[in-house]
Amino acid sequence: MKPSPPLRAHRFRDRRHTKYDFLDPILVACPGCGTEARVAGIPHEPGHPLYPALAPRRLVCRACALSRTRGGGGPVFHRSPAGTARDPYFGAPLLLQTRTRHGLLWAYNLRHLDLIERYVRASLRERAHWYDIGTGKTLVASLPVWIKRGRNRDEILRAVRRARARTVPPESRGAVATGKRFAVHRARGLG
């Protein structure tokens, strides 16, 4: 009998992403109706700085047609460990956030949530070479210790699934835009 191949460890390699890599788009709860809305950069005009975080932003909700615009300028990162996580441009609550017994798990968008999930799921985690150096911290280096602990893995992965469930599936986006959002959200247990 041939021996079974050894199990491959899930490996995560820190690609040196920072929070600035996940600022476009940002999924938020609409200030008007509470459903999924997006904060995205407006394409820059000639002569505008090319640094994406400084570009003007627009908050748009497809459900209630709310639209707000913010001129250029840097993001203002809110640090509220006890409160809710908010987007750095309009201060709207992030859509992808959920409480655990350890603290608040949040993400700007699905790519950000995927990064957290891959990190937590991995049994082998490789750090970037400048992992702990001053202001050059990567997003992974900035994660709270309770997310990094292996013993919390199952709880964090459940929280990631709960946060992901708050997004509107692509097949329902048409229903939300045409005013059927209450039936769609009620069917998904969100409202």
Image: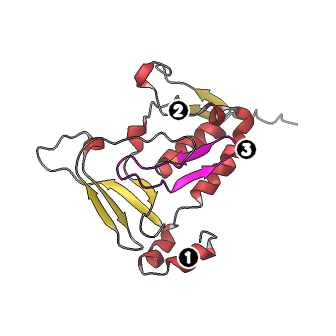
The residue that disc 1 covers is 184
> Helix, strand, or loop for circle 2?
loop
> Label 1 crowding class (10 Å Cα cut-off): few <14, some 14-19, many 20+?
some
Asked if disc 3 and disc 1 are in contact, CB closer than 8 Å, the reply is: no
Name which residue type carries label 1: Val
Mark toward the start of the polypeptide (3 vs 1): 3
Q: Residue at x 57, y 73 (%)?
A: 185
Amino acid on which disc 2 is placed: Val
Corner quadrant of residue 49? top left
Q: Which residues are magenta?
A: 84-106
Seen from the viewer's position, the closer of residues 103 and 111 is 103
Mark 3–mark 1 distance (CA, rounded to whole Å): 29 Å
- In which quadrant is the C terminus drawn? bottom right
C-alpha span from label 3 to label 2: 18 Å
Mark sitting on residue 154: 3
Q: Residue at x 42, y 34 (%)?
A: 18
Disc 3 marks a residue whose amino acid type is: Asp
Q: Which residue is mark 2?
A: 140
**Magenta includes 85?**
yes
Q: Is residue 33 above or below residue 138?
A: below
